[in-house]
Image (tube, rainbow, N blue to C red):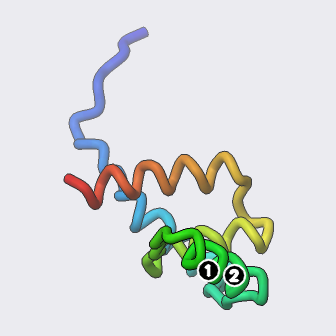
Amino acid sequence: MTITARSEPVVTRSAKDEILALARAHGVGYRPSSRDAWAEQVTRLAGDEVRLDDTELLLIALQRGGHISRPVALGLQAQYLREIRL
C-alpha cells in the first residue's frame, strides 16, 4: 500500500466566510429582540460600550435558531475576533 501526500493546497475559509455560509445555508438573518434592547440599555447604563458587527449578530441569529450550539458559536466568534485583529 502506497500513501501519497495531496499535492493540492488545503484551502480553509475564514471565520467570517464560514459564518456567512452558515447563515446563507439556513436562511438566517439577525432580528433584534426585546431582550436585545434591554441588554443594550443595561450595558449602556453600566458605562460599557459593546458594539457587535453584522457578522457577530449573524452568529447570535444562528445560535438562537438552533443551527449551531453555543460552544460552536463561541469558537467561531473567537476565531473571527482573532482574524479581524490581525
Residue located 67% across and 90% down the image: 31
Q: For numbered disc 1, what is the local secondary structure?
A: helix
Q: Is residue 79 left or right of residue 23?
A: left
- Quadrant housing residue 49: bottom left
Residue 40, numbered circle: 1
Residue located 75% across and 87% down the image: 33
As drawn, the residue found furthest toward the top would be: 1
Residue of label 2: 36
Q: Are marks 1 and 2 in contact (CB under 8 Å)?
A: yes
Q: How crowded is mark 2: few (under 14 residues within 10 Å), some or many (20 or more)?
A: few
Which residue is at the front of the view, 21 or 36?
36
Q: For numbered disc 2, what is the local secondary structure?
A: helix
Which residue is at the front of the view, 11 or 8?
11
Kindly report which numbered mark, 1 or 2, lies closer to the viewer in this rendering.
1
Q: Is residue 65 left or right of residue 9?
A: right
Which residue is at the front of the view, 8 or 32?
32
State whether residue 79 is above or below residue 2: below
Residue located 28% across and 60% down the image: 84
Give the quarter of the figure containing the N terminus. top left
State whether residue 30 is above or below residue 74: below
Residue located 30% across and 43% down the image: 10
Residue 47 at x, y percent in the picture: 50, 71
Q: What residue type is labelled 2?
A: Asp
